[in-house]
Image (tube, coloured by chain):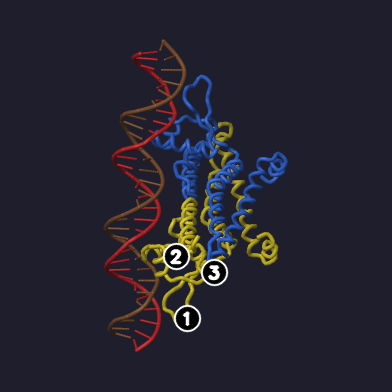
Chain colours: A yellow, B blue, C red, D brown
Amino acid sequence: MKLAEAKAQFIQSWGSLGAQWGINRTMAQIHALLMIMPDPLSADEIMAELNISRGNTNMNVRELINWGLVDRVLIPGERKEYFTAEKDIWKVATEIARERKRRELEPIIKTLNQLQEVEGDAKDKHVKAFKDSIQNLNKFAHQTDRAINSFVKAEESWFYGTLMKLFK
Amino acid sequence: MKLAEAKAQFIQSWGSLGAQWGINRTMAQIHALLMIMPDPLSADEIMAELNISRGNTNMNVRELINWGLVDRVLIPGERKEYFTAEKDIWKVATEIARERKRRELEPIIKTLNQLQEVEGDAKDKHVKAFKDSIQNLNKFAHQTDRAINSFVKAEESWFYGTLMKLFK
DNA sequence: TACATGTTTCAGTTTTTATTGAAAGTTCGA
DNA sequence: TCGAACTTTCAATAAAAACTGAAACATGTA
């Protein structure tokens, strides 16, 4: 397989993977492109590679920067902005975990805590079933929170980081 | 908070959580509803509770059954079908993990394996960057695969299952 | 066999989400 | 201060996804 073909296929696969996980296809494709390019790309280069508009490029790159997956790079002497992506997939994974935890897990924990305070006769089986479910979910959510914390921490800590490299 | 209000809020939260994870909102809402109901519901009851059409109900319930998250229940003497959801969230999590692994991780591993065979001069930095990224991702994918396997197995195995209960 | 009680399908429609492209905004050097 | 080079915004549009409702299908019963 030729590089160009392989590149195109990777970008398309990464794009549909993203889409299945609630990440906009174009955003995932830009991320894929930047991951496999040796050097930073400008907005124009991204537009050309993926055949997308300037506005689309700008919005999705900004979003990737918000997620901490892409960085702006300034090249001395150049006025344009360039973009580059983290290439260590473990770091990518911890960034995503951290971000989704903040955006989704933390809010749901807040909601679950509120919902536990539902009033009503504990002998009513509807009330009981509801309370049991919520408690179950709440425990699970906290457990998940702790698991993500360890995962994120492992990548950050020098000691665990070194240890982890043995497994990669 | 009254039960009805809490129920509605839970269904809506679970629905938007699902949407953020690439799961259709209605499907997640039906799942939420069935999780908190003490007894199985019929299609008509689901329609009424969520204000959705019969077709929509049917399609999403079928999909939930495909995911292994909902079961058909036959009530003796009744002609209608009833539906119920797994209430142990750990089992739900392992079902989802198993299913997404099969549907998404396994295909991407196949693709990554193919993409590693890209031809081209290993000294070309574009080729090198591409190969490196793919290899990195491939390792990560396998690692993830193994992690999911352990997770799924832990829930299934009696021994680990018992052990896990200590933490729940 | 006719009919009552369900369930399933899917073409058409609605809703949501993503994308475009041009105008407005910003920054910097002369 | 002007204008070239570049970035950002956002109303309009396009594309994708979800939903409806009615017809077709299935199944058990008299």
Dot 2 lies on which element? helix
Percent position (x, y) of residue B161? 69, 41
Discs 2 and 3 share one subunit:
no
Dot 1 lies on which element? loop
A13 horizontally vs A48: left or right: right
Q: Cα distance, mark 3 to mark 1?
A: 30 Å
Residue at 47 percent across and 57 percent down: it is A9
Discs 3 and 1 share one subunit:
no
Residue at 57 percent across and 39 percent down: it is A131
Q: Nearer the viewer, mark 3 or mark 1?
A: 3
Percent position (x, y) of residue B76? 53, 21
Percent position (x, y) of residue A127? 55, 35
Q: Earlier in the sequence, mark 1 or mark 2?
A: 2
Discs 1 and 2 share one subunit:
yes
Amino acid identity at mark 1: Pro
Determine which residue is flagged by label 3. Answer: B121
The chain containing the residue under callout 3 comes to B
Asked if residue B65 can be seen in this view, the reply is: yes
Residue A76 numbered tag: 1
Amino acid identity at mark 2: Val
Q: Quadrant of residue B154?
A: top right
The chain containing the residue under callout 1 comes to A
D7 horizontally vs A103: left or right: left
Residue at 46 percent across and 63 percent down: it is A4
Determine which residue is flagged by label 2. Answer: A61
